[in-house]
Image (tube, rainbow, N blue to C red):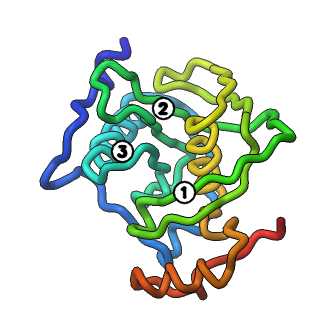
Amino acid sequence: MAASLAVEKKKLKNPPLQLHYLGDRVLRQPAKRVSKVDDSIRDIARKMLQTMYSADGIGLAAPQVGINKQILVIDIHPDDPEAEPLVMINPVIKDFSEELEVCQEGCLSIPGVYLEVRRPAMVEVSYKDEWGRPQVIMAGGLLARAIQHEIDHLTGVMFVDRVENQALLRHELKEHGFTASAVRPIAA
């Protein structure tokens, strides 16, 4: 079954979906739950993977390509043709570790900006896979960070909202052509 979602991990000159960038309203709207997982949802996931690989990303949420649905794709091993990408539909963080890690993050919707963000080191997430089957995953490390980052997108939150060093944030955004007024800081 999963073979039908198989996507070649390569850059396309013309990715099937267009990325939206910081300042675009679509990135701030909470995404709607997917009521039925069918071929149209799998097609969106396939196109999201193609777009993510084309942009050299490791994760992509549907709002980043203008689709207001709770769908995300992740592949923390984009250079490994054997590594299967993760498709998560209606993901919910069920539990997270008290241990926090600070690591640098970037985002396809804010190209060139990389800043440190504090997040739980481990998460437990329930979701539906691309076939509508309920799944639960315990994740740590880069996968946990990518899942949290992409789930944030589904609620209209962007990683820059979580950056604690506001002076560096303003500098980096300005340096890369973005405005700090598009940031919605989240209280730590």
Residue that appears at 48% across and 74% down: 22
Circle 1: element type: strand
Q: Which residue is mark 3?
A: 48
User: Residue 177, how many percent across, how many down?
Assistant: 40, 85
The residues bearing labels 1 and 3 have C-alpha atoms spaced at a distance of: 20 Å
Q: Is residue 105 above or below residue 49?
A: below
Question: Looking at this view, is 92 or 105 the one in front?
Answer: 105
Residue that appears at 48% across and 32% down: 87
Residue lying furthest left in this view? 13
Residue type marked 2:
Val
User: Residue 25, how many percent across, how many down?
Assistant: 52, 75
Labelled disc at residue 53: none
Q: Which residue is mark 1?
A: 105
Circle 2: element type: strand
User: Residue 151, how many percent across, how many down?
Assistant: 62, 48
Labelled disc at residue 87: 2
Q: Is residue 15 toward the left or the right of residue 103 in the image? A: left
1 or 3: tag closer to the N-terminus: 3
- Name the image quarter holding residue 17: bottom left
Residue type marked 1:
Glu
Q: Is residue 29 toward the left or the right of residue 92 in the image? A: left
Question: Looking at this view, is 171 or 17 the one in front?
Answer: 171
Q: Is residue 95 toward the left or the right of residue 46 in the image? A: right
Q: How many marks are shown on the rendered structure?
A: 3
Q: Quadrant of the N terminus?
A: top left
Q: Quadrant of the C terminus?
A: bottom right
1 or 2: tag closer to the N-terminus: 2
| CA neighbours of label 1 inside 10 A, class few (<14), some (14 to 19), many (20+) | some
Q: Are marks 1 and 3 in contact (CB under 8 Å)?
A: no
- Name the image quarter holding residue 142: top right
